[in-house]
Image (cartoon, grey):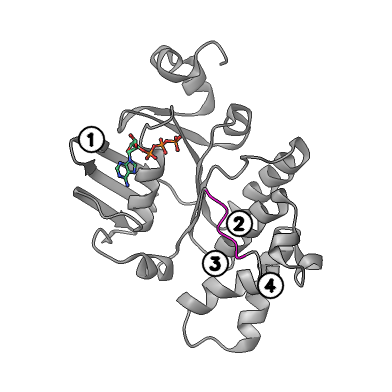
Amino acid sequence: MTPLLTTRDLRKNYGGLRAVDGVDFAIMPGEIRAVIGPNGAGKTTFVSLICGRVPPTSGQIVLDGNDITDLPAHDRVRRGIAYTFQITSVFSALSAYDNVALPVQRTLTGRSKGRLHAGVMSALERTGLADRADTTAGALSYGHQRLLEVAMGLALKPRLLILDEPTQGLSDGEIESFMQLAREIARDATVLLIEHNMQVVMELADRITVMNAGKILAEGTPEQIRANAEVQRAYLGTEA
Ligand SMILES: Nc1ncnc2c1ncn2[C@@H]1O[C@H](COP(=O)(O)OP(=O)(O)OP(=O)(O)O)[C@@H](O)[C@H]1O
């Protein structure tokens, strides 16, 4: 199997700071990959480079064998990369339905209204929000707003869905539902998530990439990462 996406010697400098420092990375189709690491390790910068929110200083990003390094973010969305933001990005005055319709309308031109409606409703159904389609997003609970963000990404029918701390602020029950949803999404897409909750990471991820100071410190299955002494020293501490 060939990787869905690879990065080669990917770098992002902010002045003298090497936020992402020569990352060689590959993710296989259908994988659930967690990116973990201490605060400031470069995780958000790394996924921002992949989705095109941030231009790299140097290096290469390849999707399906095509170099997408210089493509703008909206072209990457068309090619199947969707990203949900760490900070709640829903428009609180709009309904849940309109929030999901927005990214679809903005990126997929020439779609019929019927197909748009079907796409929006399918994303709301998959995230369990269909009965709240007409609810103003600002009136949804925090957990439902996070799910709405996932629905906004799903409506783009991504091949690679990037989630930045999707379980932050969720209750235990909501985290459980999110994990079921992520597994369901991974049946026909690839999931790359930044996650601080180690229980979620260990239960959900097929493989884990550990970042530290802009570099990949280790990569492997949850069992391998748990057993990695260097990772434990740098990040997991005694919690592992
Ligand atoms: N736009 C920016 N300008 C300058 N420095 C930045 C910028 N964005 C990120 N950085 C710096 O780059 C480094 C990596 O940040 P990044 O947000 O990618 O880390 P992270 O691993 O996602 O951290 P966290 O877990 O806290 O979200 C940090 O030192 C951060 O201060």
Give whichever of discs 1 and 4 has the lower sequence position: 1
Residue 206 % position (x, y): 53, 37
Is residue 93 something that shows in the picture? yes
Give whichever of discs 3 and 1 has the lower sequence position: 1
The label shown at residue 97 is: 4
In the image, residue 56 lies in the stretch drawn in magenta:
no
Residue at point 49%, 29% (across, down): 221
Mark-to-mark CA distance, 3 and 2: 11 Å
Inspect the image, locate mark 4, and give the three-letter code of the amino acid beneath it.
Tyr
Q: Which residues are magenta?
A: 87-91
Front: mark 3 or 4 = 4
Asked if labels 1 and 3 touch by Cβ distance under 8 angstroms, the answer is no
Front: mark 2 or 1 = 1
**Residue 15, quarter of picture:** top left
In the image, residue 89 lies in the stretch drawn in magenta:
yes
The residue wearing badge 1 is 17
Q: Residues within 10 Å of mark 2 (few under 14, many from 20)?
A: many
- 213 on left or right of 102: left
Whether residue 11 is situated above or below residue 91 in the rendered picture: above
Q: Secondary structure at mark 4?
A: helix
Mark-to-mark CA distance, 3 and 4: 16 Å
Residue at point 62%, 33% (across, down): 200
Residue at point 23%, 62% (across, down): 70
Q: Which residue is more in the foreground, 213 or 230? A: 213
The residue wearing badge 3 is 157
**Residue 174, quarter of picture:** top right
Is disc 1's CB within 8 Å of ligand 1? Answer: yes
Residue 129 % position (x, y): 75, 62
Whether residue 81 is situated above or below residue 120 in the rendered picture: above
Assign the C terminus to one quadrant of the image. Answer: top right
